[in-house]
Amino acid sequence: MSTATLQVPATKDETDILNLLEARHRAHHDKDGAAIAATYASDAAVFSLAPPLTHHGVDPKEKQAWLDSWATPVDLESRAFKLTVSGDFAFSHGFLRLSGTKKGAEGKADFWMRSTVCFERHGSGWHIVHEHVSVPFYMDGALRPAFDLQP
């Protein structure tokens, strides 16, 4: 599992949010769908790579089914993340690398995505309330995802 420090935390809130993101990275590596879902608010707006256009919250069973389609751990690595905290809300953006090996014909995956994550402090701590990840695509008419880009 490879995770990069997003920045040097200066406050308890920043440390708590960075720990939340580290827990999400670890849960991907451990292939634990329930632990991933626990980092999100139940009504979080999630704009992920998978259809449909938006998800509302993270279903632990759906996440576990996706994790079970991997032959290896799913590793996430953060790079160039910036985090801003203001009261009970926080915002981060940067790059996220996903790597691992899928079962079946898909095989090895290793690519960078753009990522924006918004957090809200609830009674039990910080949770992800909005997430948007995307992979750029080549605008040359082929509409191929640009999986070869690196930060």
Image (cartoon, rainbow, N blue to C red):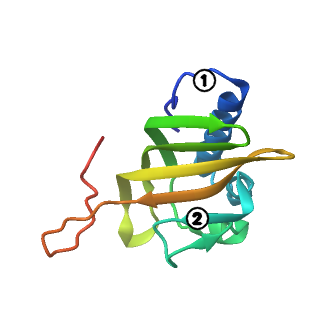
Residue furthest bottom as drawn: 52
Residue 2 in view, yes or no: no
Instruction: Name the residue at 63% across, 42% down.
Output: 90
Instruction: Name the residue at 70% across, 58% down.
Output: 37
**Image-based side of 90 in relation to 88, left or right:** left
**Image-based side of 101 in relation to 56, left or right:** left
Query: Considering the image in quadrants, where does the C terminus appear?
Result: top left
**Image-based side of 93 in relation to 21, left or right:** left
Q: Neighbour class for label 1 at 10 Å: few (<14), some, many (≥20)?
A: some
Q: Position of residue 16 (x, y in %)?
A: 71, 33
Relative height, residue 9 to residue 83 (above, below): above
Task: Report helix, strand or loop for mark 1.
Answer: loop
Q: Position of residue 48 (x, y in %)?
A: 50, 65
Question: What is the spatial separation of the Cα atoms under label 1 and label 2, in whole angstroms?
Answer: 25 Å
Task: Report helix, strand or loop for mark 2.
Answer: strand
Circle 2 is placed at which residue position? 46
Circle 1 is placed at which residue position? 9
Residue 12 in view, yes or no: yes
Q: Position of residue 143 (x, y in %)?
A: 22, 73
Callout 1 amino acid: Pro
Quarter-of-image position of residue 45: bottom right
